[in-house]
Amino acid sequence: MSTSESLDRMELCESLLTWIQTFGVEAPCKTVEDLTGGVVMAQVLQKIDVTYFSDTWISRIKPEVGENWRLKISNLKKVLKGILDYNQEVLGQHINDFTLPDINLIGEHSDAAELGRMLQLILGCAVNCEQKQEYIQTIMMMEESVQHVVMTAIQELMSKETPVAGGNDSYVDLDRQLKKTVEELNDALATKEEIAQRCRELDLQALHVQEERDRLRLEFNELEERVAALQEEKSSLLAENHVLMERLNQSDSIEDVNSPAGRRHLQLQTQLEQLQEETFRLEAAKDDYRIRCEELEKELLDVKSQNEELTSLADEAQSLKDEMDVLRHSSDKVSKLEGTVEHYKKKLEDMGLLRRQVKLMEEKNTVLMQNTVTLEEELRKANATKGQLDTYKRQVVELQNRLSEESKKADKMEFEYKRLKEKVDSLQKEKDHMRTERDSLKETIEELHCVQAQEGQLTSSLFPLVSNDGSDSLAAEITTPEIRYDLPTSPFTSLY
């Protein structure tokens, strides 16, 4: 970065800092350090477009950053992203070939040149938003030096802006109108500066003329005083000459040069001639100064008339500027009206389509009417069989009810069948188990009978009754469970 560019960026930062103060935000914005936290810029963006930069968006900006440069950089990143998104989504334009600000330098070192770039992007948002007339008028009310720097910044930024794809024609026209407006505004400012400079020069010239006139007037007054003094001296000399002449007439002749009276007469005559020459010279100088004074008065009148003409030209330039503002406002209205006209054109096209659709619908309606007549005839024929259809419906409903009842009974029987089958299976298993035990007991009894048979006839003959009772009771014990478990199986066998 060259030295001149750095100086320009510093001047840009100071001018835009003055412009930022016109928003009247809550956070302090007097110095560069006040803006490095990003809070002031976020509040300015919210004033530019409160809908896009809402309270939800600004709540993400941390207000208390202090000297923490990391928090400052975080806030500046959010602000820069918001500016770029606003240009793309709302204003419909990209910023190409424009060096984006280095937020690290702003946050860590409070770099004024990079801060100027950041404020220049905010300026672009302000002069392209819906309230741009208000912000441009605010710029026009600032000092001329600040106006010049701000307008140069706007022109530089607008030369880097390109419209987003989609609706390019309208954005190109708008961009062309804005550039033309900026050029006209720059021309008006240049003309205003030239007129102001010319007025200052004429004022200085008039002041010099006035000073010259006053000086000549003083000299003229001095000359008049000197002429009056010389005239008085001439009068006194004439009176003295008259006295001397009278005395000379009474005394010696003045024609005698050698006589005292003659020498005095010659001396007085020479002095008188010198005084007459001085008087003539002063009268000539007086006439010259009078002529010079009249010329200066005429020149002063010419300068005053030129000053009045330039003042009228300045007023006319101001009126042209106001007219340009009105025309700019009218241009915005025309753009809006053109958009409205395009909208109504699309509506008219849609109306043409709707008319064609209505015509098609009428044709379809005619066909449907014919179909309706046919269906009514069929309906009259169908009414004859409506009674039978109702009877069939009632029968179907009854059959459906019966079917549902039978289905419920079948489901219930199936459930009962499954439950009983499970019970039978369990009983069958128990029966098999009991049969196995019975067989084992039978084998045990047979073995016991063999043992008893082997013990001898004596024991069996002595206790015949006891043994018979024991065997009978044992047999009863063995057969009783089998009979007990065989009896419940009879209801289930019928199900099989």
Image (cartoon, rainbow, N blue to C red):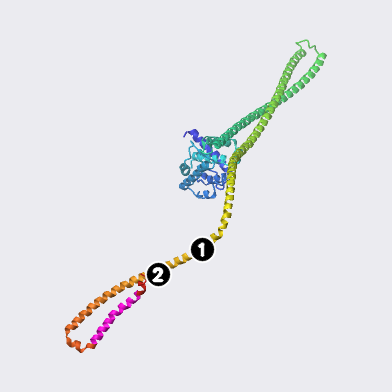
Identify which residue is drawn at 52% across, 48% down: 57
> Does the segment drawn in magenta span residue 316?
no
Q: Residue 437: image x %, image y %?
A: 26, 76
Q: Closer to the camera, 105 or 350?
A: 350
Which amino acid lies under the numbered mark 1 shown in the image of this protein? Gln
* Residue at the spot 40% in from the left edge and 67% down from the top edge: 414
Q: Position of residue 314 (x, y in %)?
A: 65, 32
Q: Is residue 488 above or below residue 290?
A: below
User: Mark 2 sits on what residue?
Assistant: 416
Residue 11, percent from left and from top: 53, 37
Q: Dot 2, how many residues are within 10 Å of its Cα: few (below 14), some (14-19), or many (20+)?
A: few
Is 119 above or below relative to 270?
A: below
| Quarter of the image where one finds residue 267 | top right
In this rendering, is residue 212 above or below 487? above
Q: Which mark is residue 17?
A: none
Judged by its main secondary structure, the magenta piece is: helix
Three-letter code for the amino acid on which mark 2 is drawn: Glu
Q: Secondary structure at mark 1?
A: helix
Q: Which residue is mark 1?
A: 395
Give the extent of the magenta segment. 466-489
Q: Would you call the spot at circle 1 few (<14 residues within 10 Å), some (14-19), or many (20 or more)?
A: few
Q: Is residue 283 visible?
A: yes
Side (left or right) of 398 relative to 462: right
Rendered image quadrant of residue 335: top right
The answer to whether residue 136 is above or below residue 450 is above
